[in-house]
Image (cartoon, rainbow, N blue to C red):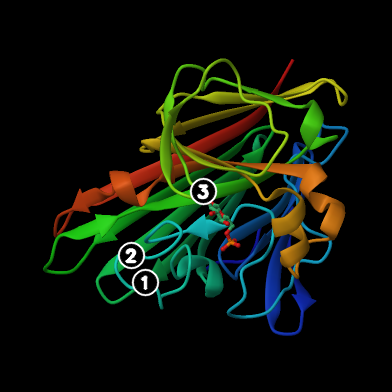
Amino acid sequence: MKALPPSVSLIEAARDYPVYEIRHAKAEARIAAHGAHVMNWKPASATHEVVYLSPDAILREGKAIRGGIPICWPWFNAHPSDPKLPSHGYARDRFWELREANEDENGVQLVFTLDLPALNAELRIACGETLDLTLTTRNNGPETIALSGALHSYFSVSNIREVVITGLAESDYLDTVGKRTPRHQNGDVRISEEVDRIYHSVSAVTLHDPTWKRAILIEKSGSPSTVIWNPWIEKAAALGDLPDEAYEDFVCIESAIANESAIALEPGQSHGLSTRISLID
Ligand SMILES: O=P(O)(O)OC[C@H]1O[C@@H](O)[C@H](O)[C@@H](O)[C@@H]1O
C-alpha cells in the first residue's frame, strides 16, 4: 500500500496494536487494525461522541474491543451449530490488512480485508460528516455458505432512559432475553430493562436523544435484521470490560443478518452489508 494520506496517522494504541487515527476537517476517528474496528467517530458538527467506546475496553489480540463498531462475521452471536466457536465470528478477534487509504475534501476512505480459507471480507469505511461502512463477503470456496453477521454499532447517549428509537414501530421481533419469544413492537422503542431483540426489518432507524438535542439516523442495506441491545444492570456488571454504570451511556443498534435470516452465499457469489450513520436536525 502507498503512504497514508496526511489526515491519517498510524499509532500504537497498545503494544503491537496499530490504530489509524484520523484528524480531518470533516471528522475525527480511530480505527483499529484489529477487527477493522471503528473505535471512535466524531463528525465536526457533533458536540458529543457519536460512537460509544467503553473506557475499560481491552486492546489485545484475540479480544474484541468493547464498544465502537465491531464487525461480526461470518456469523452473528453464537455459531448456529458449534457453540465452541467464538461468539460473533472471527472478524473482531483478528488483525485485518489495510489495502487502501485515501482522502478528499469530504473525508477519509479506508479499505481493509480479511481472508478465511474459503471466504474473503472487504470492509470499506468512508469517514466524514457521515460514516459509511460496507462489508462485502465473497465466497471463494466450493460449498454454499450460510452467511450471517452484523455491523454492531454502539451509540453514545446522554442516558439510556431518555432516548427513543423510531423506525421499528409495528415490526415483528424475536426477543432473545430469556426464552426466545416472537413479539410485536407496538409504538417506538424505549429502553428501561435489558433488551436483546432481533427485529425483522430492513428500514432505517433514528435514535432521538432530546437531552443532547440530537438525532442519529442509521440507514442500511443488505440487512434483513436490526438488532437492539442494551445489557442493563446485571449483565453490564458481569462484563469485565464495561464499567458497571455504563449501560446508561450507550445503546447498540446493529445492521445485522441474524442466523435465522442467514444468506445462502453460493460459490463465487458476493454479498454487501452496509450502514450509513449521520447526525440529523
Ligand atoms: O459480549 P459480546 O460477544 O460482544 O456480545 C454482546 C451482545 O451482542 C449483541 O449483538 C447480541 O444480540 C447479544 O446477545 C450479545 O450479548
The residue that disc 3 covers is 151
Q: Residue 42 at what x, y percent from top left?
A: 77, 41
**Do tag 3 and tag 1 residues touch (Cβ < 8 Å)?**
no
Nearer to us in this view, 91 or 185: 185
The label nearer to you, 3 versus 2, is 3
* Percent position of residue 278, x then y: 65, 29
Does residue 20 appear to the left or right of 119 in the view shown?
right
Q: Are marks 1 and 2 in contact (CB under 8 Å)?
A: yes
Residue at coordinates 78% horizontally, 58% vertically from top-left?
Answer: 54
Relative to 267, say whether 150 is above or below: above
Q: Earlier in the sequence, mark 3 or mark 2?
A: 2
Query: What amino acid is at disc 2?
Result: Asn
Between the residue at mark 1 and the residue at mark 2, the CA separation in whole angstroms equals 5 Å
Which residue in the structure is indicated by mark 1? 115
**Label 3 CB, ligand 1: below 8 Å?**
no
Q: 199 or 142, which lies in front?
A: 199
* The quadrant where residue 50 appears: top right
Kind of residue at badge 1: Asp
- Residue at mark 2: 120
